[in-house]
Image (spheres, coloured by chain):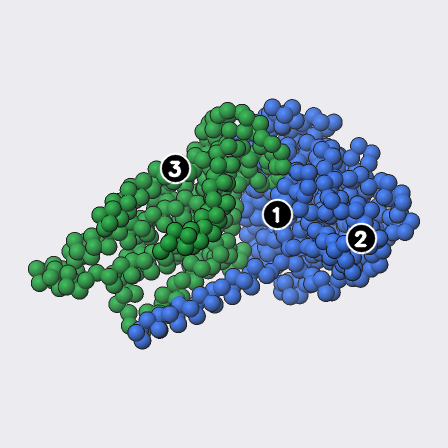
Chain colours: A green, B blue
Amino acid sequence: MRRREFASFIGPSLLVMVGLLVLPLIRTVQWSFQEVNYGQAGTFIGLSNYTQALGDPRFGRAVFFTLLLTAIVTALILVVGYLVAIGVNGLGKLRPYILGSMLVAYVLPGVVGAVSFSWLFNSNFGGVLNLVIERLTGQELLWFTDTWPNRVMIIAHTVWHLLPFSVLMILAGLQGVPKELREAARIDGANALKMHLWVIIPTMRGIIGFVCLITIMDVLRTFDSLIPLSPQADAIGNESIMFYVFDNAFRDGSQQLGLGSAVNVLSILLILICLFPFIRDLLKEAKAKA
Amino acid sequence: MRNRTQIRTGITAMVIAASLTSLTACGAGSRTGAEDATAVECDYTMPEGETTVNVLAYNSSAIDPFTNTMVKSCTRENVTLKHDPIDFSGQVTKTTATLSGDTGSYDILETYGFAVPEIASAGSIVPLDDFVAEYGEKYELDALNEGMRSALSYDGKLYALPMQAQMYVMAYRQDIFDELDLTAPESFEDMIAAAEAIREQGDIEYPIALPMSATADISTIYQAAMNSTGTDFLDAGEPQFTSDGSREALEGLKSLLPYMDPEVTTFDQPSVQQQMFNGNAAMAIMFSGRMNDLTLESNSPNFDKFGFAAPPSLAADAPYLFSRLSVDGWAIPENTQLDKDMLFQMIASSVGEDASNASVPAAYPAREGIVTDESSAYAVAANETIAATMPAPNDPFSAPVTNAIRPVLVEVLLGQTEVEDGMQEMQRLAEETVSGS
């Protein structure tokens, strides 16, 4: 391919990436050191926004909750996603329909799915699951105002929403494991559990790393689903970092864009720290293949 | 190969179904189709070039009739009025954004009495007195209620043309009250007594429903309770959170909590409506704009069992009712690039007699004489409430102070903070906000 052709192919996407990613990122870093109101030039205030964010116990609670949610959801997505993928892989004609119906949860806009999901637990809107759990346990759980029941609901929704992607990826990985490798392991006397633990999973390490990477990124950005699922997230310690940013920077006409930008910069650093092992592995793998 | 085709077909069908579901949900916006809107005369001087007038107004059954009348009647020849569906929270955020720069995204804004002092004192919206003097007779603007005009004024100038007002109204289950020989409560004490009687009967566990959503409504409820004692958040710019009125309001609201759903701090007005639709509550207090929905057969099997009354007072000897008067109106941003004379005539035409008549019973129009006792099932209650609601003082710090104290208020009502400690903390936050530190 000639240089000019290469430039004409890559140019438009480069332009979009610079316009929509690089420039806003530069502006975010700039604003994080300023006091900024809509439509006005910012005033430099040094590290004040960072000290305000880091000294705010509410921000600390938001970081804790977001990391807790990310850790639990990622673990569940990997385990449940793997088990479901194995089950789906063994299906015959029903496979496309099962896969298709699972994807509904993934393609629904987050807030629409979250509203529907919240109704399952809301006695004011039918609350089918709430009713079943009440009948089974004899306890009235406050899904929206008690910290842990609310966390369980948020985790369940996030897993429901993100699971189809991981199932699809892992399913593709399962189908890519060479038959010869399985046969060899079977001849060597490996049972089903050992086959998965020592043969299949190591073969799919790259795909599992990729699923982890995407899941962690998605969960760290949790925002819109909390509006219906946790209407008083701040009061019960179930506020995500992105929700904290929105509440400070925009809600009710708030204009703390500087503080919001500082929290965003801190979030980017946090995301990079969380993703570092996976990015390093992916780069290593790419280098090895090259 | 056949298997792959099956997978593709299955997945495609499901994804299309899900996408259609999503699109249907996205389309749910305005409750009143613009095609059904009232047509009125909208007689402005036609600009020479193609002109788009962007209107920012949240969707509700009380506001839509005025918005739709304006959009339908004033769109002609070179001029197109554009209004996209939006909720109240979105309107608040977009109002701040559009008013901040030298140019904005909107040319006509829906606003309300609580917000006017802050944006008027910042010079972000245009005083309308000169336009009213010029066009008052043409659009019969003298017929707009004086109190509502005052609610949208700041520093002696009118900043928004009132279209409609909302005040708290109590809806209750007339059938249950009759069966238990109860009358509409006139104080919080009466409400508790009625709630106990209803609970004892055994059908309804939590008879009282109030919108106390921790992210918005809770501060309005607190302010209404303070207003019942004759105090407000601010008095001549001084925060009043350590006043006796504040204490009585907090203790009064806490006394109702055992009779409300344990998750009441997540309930906004639609949730409270839902409680009444379902029969999960027997008494609810909400803004009057929400009452019409209760009387519609399509919404609830209980639609014909509701009675309406003015809300109670905090105490039997309180000077005012437990209520807030929220007046909605049209404002013109200072930073619009369009002819302000044209924009004023557009908003004036939308609050005319025909549009106001069409808004009843969903709204309580600002135009005098439109709402009579026969206008709706809750008209008598609304008229009684208006007469006994504390006039809202106009202070530019009301909105920022409200945002500042809300998290502490939530903690107090959830029992996480003692009343006295909460009052001191709210006072401190309010003083910081007013002083700008």
Query: Are discs 3 and 1 both within one chain?
Result: no
For label 2, count other residues whose C-alpha is less than 10 Å away and answer few (under 14), some (14-19) or many (20+).
few
Q: Position of residue A73 (x, y in %)?
A: 36, 48
Q: Position of residue A258 (x, y in %)?
A: 54, 32
The residue that label 3 is drawn on is A270
For the question of whether residue B65 can be seen, the reply is no
The residue that label 2 is drawn on is B47
Q: Position of residue B337 (x, y in %)?
A: 74, 44
Residue at image position (24%, 61%) is A176
Label 3 and label 2: CA atoms lie apart by 54 Å
Corner quadrant of residue B398: top right
- Subunit of label 1: B
Corner quadrant of residue B156: top right
Residue furthest out toward the left? A188
Closer to us: A192 or A215: A215
Q: Are marks 2 and 1 in contact (CB under 8 Å)?
A: no
Circle 1: residue type: Gly
Residue at image position (84%, 53%) is B44
Please report whichever mark, 2 or 1, sits nearer to the chain's N-terminal start. 2
Closer to us: B336 or B287: B336
At numbered mark 1, what does the secondary structure look like: helix, strand or loop? Answer: helix
Residue at image position (49%, 64%) is B19
Label 3 and label 1: CA atoms lie apart by 29 Å
At numbered mark 2, what does the secondary structure look like: helix, strand or loop? Answer: loop
Find residue B90 and name its label: 1
Check the picture and name the quadrant holding the C terminus of chain B.
top right
Residue at image position (31%, 55%) is A80
Circle 2: residue type: Pro
At numbered mark 3, what does the secondary structure look like: helix, strand or loop? Answer: helix
